[in-house]
Amino acid sequence: MLIIAGLGNPGSKYAGNRHNIGFMALDAIQRRPGFSPWSKKFKAEISEGELAGEKVLLMKPQTFMNLSGEAVGEAMRFYKLGPQNIVAIYDELDLPPGKARIKVGGGHGGHNGVKSLDAHCGKDYRRLRLGIGHPGAKELVHNHVLGDFAKADAAWLQPLLDALADHADMLARNEDSQLMNKLALAVGGKPEDEPAQPAKAPKDPKPAGQSHIRQARNVTQPKKLPDSGPMADMLKRMFSRKGEE
């Protein structure tokens, strides 16, 4: 069994916040065929279904972000699961908008929801981080995170969420790198594991061109004619005859 937990804050006040992209992701998955309507259990809204033949529990903790781990930990213990059976989806300041990364374990990066999950579930769960970008200054982070997505963000946000929902079965099959490729392509990026093009062999360098002066200097000079001896006498007779003709 797999628990997919999206992190966010409950209530309409926070529904459009960047901090709630985890909730948005689960809503997109739940709308796909095979998942039950949302109901309440484990201090969360839950929906049951299947992905790739495996039973899946979608969870949106209703304890507010800072206590997200209480809900997920309760469900984990109820089903006698371990952190390896959990996927957490949440916002990531340190990734550009629309960028996605997934890994097992790691630090919380200052994310209070992740801190709570670490405390209640252990750290070795899979973390699907969805980039929301950084506002550029520490004092702007709070308003950025708890601010709504801008209208312009729809250009990447909706394709990202749709692609995640369309390929959520890859989470159940542990096809994490393939899923990252699908999400990258959905927002106009390149596949993460696209094989590098083999480097072309360098062409043989052409010999440097020589000026006509240098070429003339490199021509092999004829040997100096002998001044005396039989050979000298013969050459003199030959040239003297040509001059007489």
Image (tube, rainbow, N blue to C red):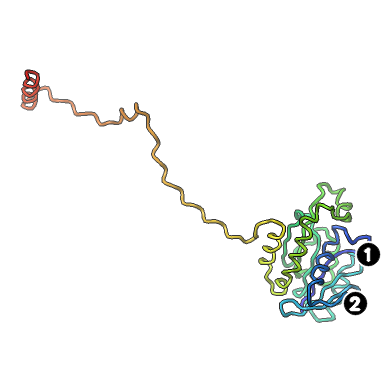
Q: Is residue 73 above or below residue 187?
A: below
Would residue 118 be visible to someone looking at this image? no
Tell me the residue that label 1 is attached to.
11
Q: Is residue 87 left or right of residue 182?
A: right
- Residue drawn 6% across the image and 18% down it: 244
Q: Is residue 200 left or right of residue 206?
A: right
Would residue 188 be visible to someone looking at this image? yes
Q: Nearer the viewer, mark 2 or mark 1?
A: 1
Tell me the residue that label 2 is attached to.
41
The residue under label 2 is which amino acid type? Answer: Lys
Toward which corner of the image does residue 103 lie, by quadrant?
bottom right
Toward which corner of the image does residue 105 lie, by quadrant?
bottom right
Q: Are marks 2 and 1 in contact (CB under 8 Å)?
A: no
Q: Secondary structure at mark 2?
A: strand
Q: Quadrant of the N terminus?
A: bottom right
| Tag count | 2
Q: Nearer the viewer, residue 121 or 136?
A: 136
The residue under label 1 is which amino acid type? Answer: Gly
Dot 2 alpha-carbon crowd within 10 angstroms: few under 14, some 14 to 19, many 20 or more: some
Residue 121 coordinates in the image, percent (x, y) = 82, 72
Dot 1 alpha-carbon crowd within 10 angstroms: few under 14, some 14 to 19, many 20 or more: few
Q: Is residue 102 above or below residue 149?
A: below
Q: Is residue 216 left or right of residue 243?
A: right
For the view shown, which residue lies furthest in the top direction? Answer: 244
Toward which corner of the image does residue 183 lie, by quadrant?
bottom right
Q: Nearer the viewer, residue 103 or 162?
A: 162
Residue 219 coordinates in the image, percent (x, y) = 28, 31
Residue 45 coordinates in the image, percent (x, y) = 89, 73
Badge 2 or badge 1: first in the primary sequence: 1
Q: Secondary structure at mark 1?
A: loop
